[in-house]
Structure formats: structure tokens, C-alpha cells
Image (cartoon, rainbow, N blue to C red):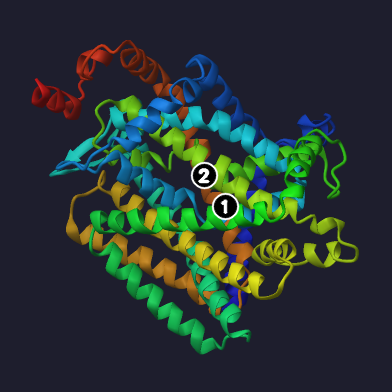
Amino acid sequence: MNEWIGHVCGIFQRISDLIWTFPTNFDWYHSIPIIGELPFVIIFLVGTGIYFTFTLGFVQVRYFLRGIKTLLNSKDSKRGISPMATFLLSTAMRVGPGNILGVTGAVSMGGPGALFWMWLSAFFGMATAFVESTLSQIYKDRQGDEYFGGLPCYGKKLLGGSTVAGVALSLLYASYAMLCLPAQGFNTLSAMVAVVQHVTGTEPSTTISWIFFLLITCLVTFAIFSGLKRIVKITDVLVPAMAVIYIGIVLIMIVTNLERFPWFFYIVVTEAFSLNSIFGGTLGIAISQGIKRGLMSNEAGQGTLSMPAAIADAKHPCEQGLIQAIGVFLDTMIICTMTGFIVVMSKVWLIEGFFDSWMELGRLDKFLAACSVLTDGGTTYELVAIAMSLCFGTFAFTSLLGYMSFAEISIKGISQSKIFLMTVRVLNLSVLIFGMATNIAGFDLSALWNISDLANIIMVCVNLPLLYLGFGKVRKSYKHFTDGSGNFNSEVLGEQLPVWDEKFKQRS
């Protein structure tokens, strides 16, 4: 079974590598200094964010505070879900294992300078998130007291109302979510077993793994079969709690190692422009790793977070765009940076005789080893390791709930049948169980991670062209928003928007 799984995952890995590295695998392109190490998709992604940023007059800066005010003042709605609830739901999907594993991997491959490029890509990614989330709100639809939409809905509208396009995009997103579930299940189970290991000080038995396997399966089953609003209630509690705990622990380690703090910014900035990284990489690798892992974490440009953006009961499409832009800021500028603080401030590569052994560790073990350096080991480290493992597991758990819920939102564009919905839920649950089973079987996480990488890059390649198609609609909506021209409805864009016309009549 392991050989078969390895073979299947190997196929995904080769396809993923082919897309991620194109056209750096051609000698004529690779010979170009620095640029030759940047894949086309990286250039396309960052270039899109830069274009949207300048065209919209740095919307992510000008309206940042207004977005926060809108978020904090949001209220529960009888129809749809409040902007705050959708923000936490989307954060559940954003703030996942990639915030720890991805950042640790980016630093270990591209050096501390990768963090700088991660910040830069996130800054421009905020504008991209604004565009795709605003589009989601413009073209959202309604079923009973719930809204749905996102990539499948705005893709269908922008492609001339093609039913085939709508169905294809819905299936694409559902497939994307499914491909990401195995790694999330693997990580959730790993984290729970790691907690037991740190508490007992011994290697947990397979029985412990099976107990957590059953527990996670039962919790997920209860959540997804109770409906979207049940999942929202869970993420409303877990996401802020774990984010506060994670940030709090990191801040304590920063305060207790305050003398290393200025050095962190020095080494990140200087290494960001170094042609020869201290980790053996190059400037191109640092840029590529920073942007790639930033995308894997904040997901700006993938269209994946267009799902929660669509279900919010917003007063204006652009309000939700601002809120999702803030989500990118929270994920990358704060959570990912916290991980960067730990890995870089530990200076593990400067410890004599430790660098080589550290590089051979898995990503989570690398991160925990960095925590050990900053806490001087001992009891304090064990407590930190337990808390960090819990945070890691919770991030993975809320992420998998997010993927499942967004898959449900996407398939509503295909059929409203309860049987169809239940079939999708069972299928997603089966894929999740597969991911946890590979953990117990001793399979390597990197293979499952490659499947997620492939799913992410396919979504980017599909979504970005659609954002360009719909950018004119976003600009008109943005002008209406900034001018304060009243309630948003069909007249703003000159096309039928039933949901917004209904809201306009209710307010009138």
C-alpha cells in the first residue's frame, strides 16, 4: 500500500514541480541572472498584485483602518453570516500548518531573506485579495437564508453565464479542497501524538494514534454534518483562541531574548538581497521560497478564499474586500512573522556542530528545535513544545473544517440536492481518513504536501485570468464605494444583480 501511495503521490509531485518551476527548467531562461530562478507563476502572481495595488491607489493602505472598523462593528445577520464570522472562518483556512511548516521550510531553503520577500508578496497580495473578495460579493447568490458564491459564481458570470463553466469551476474547487485534506488530517494527528510525547516523555504507541484517529474522525463528522453554521461556531472559538496563544508564547520568547530582536531585522533585510545566502541558496531561491510559501499560507490570488467572502452579509461588496485584505495581513505579516522570529532568532545555523543535524530534521522538528534554543531547554521548553503542538494541531483542524465547508459552498452551484451534498461530505471525510491513515502507516508528509502544492498552483492559474476579466467591475464598485454614492445595486454596474437589488429594496 505504501508503495502504491508513494507512486501516486510521485505523479502529483512531478506535475507540481513542472508547473512551479516553468520555465526555469529551460537553460536559456535559467541563465538570466536572478529572474532566471523565478518561475512564471511567481512573476504572474506578484505582478498581478502590483498592478491591482497601483491601479486601485494602494487600497490596502488607504482603507486599512476602515476595514478594521467595519470588521469590529459587524453584527450577526438573519440572512447570511456576519463579516466577523466569515473573517474567522477564512482565517481558519489561512492560519494552518503552513504558518509553521511553510515558513520554517522557506527559511531553511532560502535563508532568512525569504521572510522579506514573503512580506512583500503579502503586501501586494492584499490588493489581489481585495479584488477577488469584492468580485465574490458582487456576484453572490442566495439559497434560503444563506448566501453562496465565490470563484464558481463570478467565473460563470464573467464567462458569459456559461453553465458548463460554472459546473467545471465548482468541481475544480471541490477537487482542490479534497486534495488539501490528506495533509491537514496528517498534521492534526501528528500534533496530537506529539502532545502526548512531550507530556509523557516517551514515544507514544500506535494505540494512541488510533485513539486520536477515532476522536478526530468523530469531531469532524459532527461538525460537517451539522452544517456550515455549526462549523462557523467552532471556528469562532478556536481560531482567535489559538492565534492569541500562539502569538502570546512567541512574544514571551521574544521578550526573554530581546537582545536578538534587532539582529532579526538586520539579517532578514541583508539576506533578502544577498546573492549568496548563508544557507547556501541564492537571491532567486530566497525570492521564490518567500513568495511561494506566502501564497501557500495567505492564499491571495487562488480564489479559494472567495468562498467565505461570498457568504457574508455585507453592506457593500468592497467592505468584504477590505476585510479579506486584512486577513492576508494577519496571516502573513503577523502569524507567519511570528514563526520567522522563532526560527531566525534562534540562530540555529550559528551553533557549532548543530546546523547539519538541524537541516536533516522535519519542518515541525526544526521549529521545535528553534524553540528549544530560545527557551534553553528543560521544563520551560517542554511546556512551550506542548502549547506549540496544540496550536499546530488546532490550526490543522480548523483548516480541514474550512476546506470541507468551502467545498460545500462551491458545489451548491451544481445541485441543491441533499443527497448530492451528503455524498460530497462522505467523500471528503473518506479522503481525510486516508490522510490520517497514512500517518499511522508511517508515510512521509512531504508527498501529501506536494499534492496540496499542485492543487494550489492550479487554482492560481485558473483564478488570476478571471480576476483580470472582472477587474473593470471591481473598479466601478470601488469608485461607487469611495464616492459614498449610496446603496449598491444593479445600476452601478449596468447588469442584473438580484441579491443586491433585493437588499436595496429592503433598505429603501
Residue nearest the observer in this picture, 476 or 506: 506
Residue ID for mark 1? 99
Q: Quadrant of the N terminus?
A: bottom right
Residue displayed at 23% across by 63% down: 226
Q: Quadrant of the C terminus?
A: top left
Under tag 1, what secondary structure? Answer: helix
Using the numbered discs, state the Cα–Cα distance from disc 1 to disc 2 in whole angstroms.
Answer: 8 Å
Residue nearest the observer in this picture, 411 or 305: 305
Q: Is residue 220 visible?
A: yes
Q: Amino acid at mark 1?
A: Asn
Q: Residues within 10 Å of mark 1 (few under 14, many from 20)?
A: many
The reply to whether dot 1 and dot 2 touch (C-beta < 8 Å) is yes
The image shows residue 237 at horizontal and vertical percentages of 35, 57
Q: Is residue 361 left or right of residue 329?
A: right
Q: Is residue 440 left or right of residue 65?
A: right
Q: Is residue 104 left or right of residue 128?
A: right
Q: Amino acid at mark 2?
A: Asp
Residue ID for mark 2? 331
Instruction: Please tell me which of labels 1 and 2 falls first in the chain.
Output: 1
